[in-house]
Image: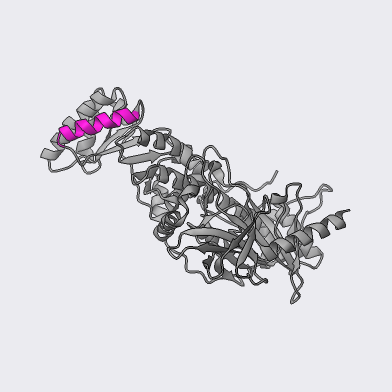
Amino acid sequence: MSKFPARLNAPAQTFSGLTTDLYEVTMACGYWKAGMSDHEAAFHVTFRENPFDGEFTVACGLATVIDFLRTFHFDETEIHYLASQRGNDGKPLFDSSVLNHLRDLRLTCDVDAVPEGTLVFPNEPMMRVCGPISQCQLLETALLNILNFQSLIATKAARVCLAAENDVVIEFGLRRAQGVDGGLSAARAAFIGGCAGTSNLQAGQQYGIPVSGTQAHSWIMFFEKESEAFQIYAKALPNNCVFLVDTYDSINGLRRAIKVAKQLQKDGHEMIGVRLDSGDRAWLSIETRRMLDKAGFPNAKIVCSGDLDEFTIAEMKQRGAKIDIWGVGTRLTTGQPDAALDGVYKLGAVRASHEQWQYRIKLSGELAKTSCPGLLQVRRFHQPDQRFIADAIYEIDHVVSEPCVIVDLGNEKHTEIPARTEYSDLLVPIFRYGELIYRVPGIEASRAYARKQLRRAPPAILRLNRPRAYKVGLERSLHELRSTLIVHAKEQRD
């Protein structure tokens, strides 16, 4: 156990050189001791399966990664902590030369990545990191932590918003998030994925996300009468009245809310609406809409909350629910039912200073899980209206031929993309030699970009039920290179 106390008051988004696993530092130590810490490496962040049994993933977390990389270093407190670590012989794990190396280390890597909001698919690189091997190794854990979680939540939010069609969706999940920092990251990712706001004030303050919220059941229960609770709230915050009507009986609660809303009107204010949190909310919303309209409140919104996800929303929409705003909490903020995106960080090539890249490959009993060698890029082919057709993963040192032939990683089926088909390369430069060269878009711009990407995707891949897989494969020369290296690696293993 360390003698150093945890920094209990650290901000939720605190990063440091120690935002990593121990084995990343031991490997960096090994490279340093072997005189290879300046040898270059190329790593890629990829994932193997889309989450939620879907057929797309929304890339998210790049801006957070940039914040981490811009200040990446080990401060004296962290160096002191590393100096306190011991091996199994009781002696220091890291000697002074290694600690001095880490103390002086500053990022000199090149980083390329897909912009936030980009739709990405299994086995495609979301990010490429090239630079000194010890630096690349030290970055692995933080990059995966950030990109895996935020991409998971952004994807869940996109699915929820697709199910809600044109209705407003608000992220409500802080109380059940995986820690304060998880709630903050989830609110950010959910907004980029399509949510219109959050209940999380810290996320609102830090990221500029619109915040929303009025009252909970405890407010209603505090007072002897439900009508009294509505009346006192209306006097306290007359410009923020969404009345929670289901504490005792939704229909009677609605009648009381309407009565208070009429008094609000006389005082020069308008009720925003009412919230349904339990019961048969599809039926209740229909009855609520009828009663609100009859009472002269056609513009009052009906908010629905309580254990919602994309499937419950789609089912309620199918039943004709009259919901204007969906407050989605636990199942969105925690990424239910998937615990994580299965992102990985794989080595594609290495080289000594000023020498040629040497390819590297990891084998697997499953061909689809065998890694891809080289420095990779993704080329997205699209129609003139920008609708996606297919993606080709290619090695940047090879020219992509026309027509382009892509090979499916699973069944090795070949698909030919006609010559002169329009395309875009997805990974864009972010850092060059450790310097940020990318203009980081605001969160609203990233959200808008995600929405544009969803509009350009084939509708069949967005379906909740039986979605169709999007066509992704290796460009033929990369497939041939990979096949050759697989044979060579097996020979070396034998």
The residue drawn where x is 80% and y is 68% is 35
Q: Is residue 285 left or right of residue 393?
A: left
Q: How many marks?
A: 0
Question: What is the magenta range?
Answer: 281-296
Residue 214 painted magenta: no
In-front residue for pair 148/453 = 453
Residue 207: give x, y in percent of width and height: 42, 55
Instruction: Relative to 385, say whether 281 is above or below.
Output: above
Instruction: Examine the rendering and report whether any part of residue 67 can be seen.
Output: yes
Q: Is residue 16 left or right of residue 467?
A: right
Residue 204: give x, y in percent of width and height: 39, 51
The residue drawn where x is 40% and y is 41% is 172
In-front residue for pair 112/426 = 426
Magenta stretch prevailing secondary structure: helix
Residue 275: give x, y in percent of width and height: 30, 34
The residue drawn where x is 33% and y is 44% is 167
In-front residue for pair 66/363 = 363
* Residue farthest left in this picture: 266
Q: Is residue 250 left or right of residue 56?
A: left
The image quadrant that residue 44 belongs to is bottom right
